[in-house]
Amino acid sequence: MPKGKLLASGKLVSIVIPALNEERNMGPVLSGVKRQMSGYNYELIVVDGHSRDRTADVARRMGAKVMYDELGKGSALIRGLGAAKGEILVSMDADLSNEPRELKLLIDAIDIGYDLCTGSRFLMGGGSEDISSLRVFGNKFFVFMVNSLFSANYTDLCYGYRSFRKSAFAKLDLEEVGFGIETEINIKAVKKGLKIIEIPSTEKKRAAGEGKLTTFGDGFVILKTIIRNLF
């Protein structure tokens, strides 16, 4: 492949970002994405959880299509990814924790034949500036459960930076409303026999505002997601 050639330059890439009260982060997030997507054919979709601030206004001003969903992160992702028109779908967070420079790796992984590409903070070359030791332990515990119960080979489970082939996403039949969505995606991808790859990803600290994830509450949601998908 010639140096600098964009593998997916002719394909529509849909980038879906669920957001709730992210007015201060939305502009920088979308600016970073647009810089990295120069030369690609792409669309930006922000799914707003009826924010109390100007998140939706900022997103529209930056050229994103804005949709609304009030139920939770999982519901917002399902809605946004389901409405996306691209052959390649990307999900990312609105808090500046995901590095836009990694978008090309996520896109190229689908373009060369994978159905699902997931960012991993625990592969060599990845990392996190914003995860506590308790959350590291919880993630490793859930990774062990999923790998053991579903014959998977994941290194990270609860991370939202990932890409999909549109036809593969349609096979997942996702249902999770909240923060169990990433776990449900990983489990169902294995159960459906999708071609999966992980790539190293570096999680940055949230730039502004407060995170919505709660360690114990959402840990219980993830556990229920694993158990529900056993049957």
Image (spheres, helix red, strand yellow):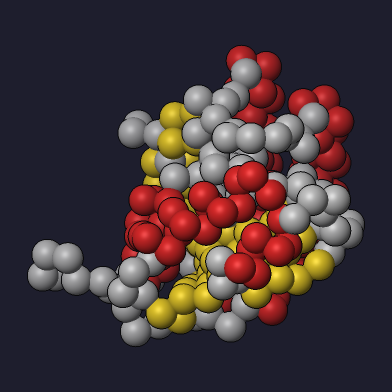
**Going 70% across and 47% down the picture, which residue do you hit?**
22
Residue placed farthest to the right in the image? Answer: 71
Residue drawn at the location 37% of the way across and 60% of the way down: 35
Q: Position of residue 188 (x, y in %)?
A: 67, 59
Q: Quadrant of residue 56?
A: bottom right
Q: Report the side of 13 relative to 101 (left or right).
A: right
Tell me where residue 86 appears, x and y as whole percent: 53, 80
68 and 194: which is toward the camera? 68
Residue 180 in view (yes/no): no
Q: Quadrant of the N terminus?
A: bottom left
The correct choice, above or below, for 137 with respect to 199 in the image is: above
Rendering coords of residue 36 (x, y %): 36, 60
Residue in the image at 67% along x and 17% along y:
134
Q: How many marks?
A: 0
Q: Is residue 68 above or below residue 19?
A: below
Percent coordinates x, y for residue 223 in the rendering = 80, 36
> 53 and 90: which one is in front?
53
Q: Nearer the viewer, residue 34 or 121?
A: 34
Where is residue 190, by image quadrant?
Answer: bottom right
Q: Residue at x 56, y 72 (%)?
A: 63
Q: Does the image show residue 18?
A: yes
Q: Residue furthest top?
A: 133
Question: The C terminus appears in which quarter of the rendering?
Answer: bottom right
- 116 versus 227 height, above or below: below
Left-right relation of 198 to 213: left
Residue extending furthest left? Answer: 2
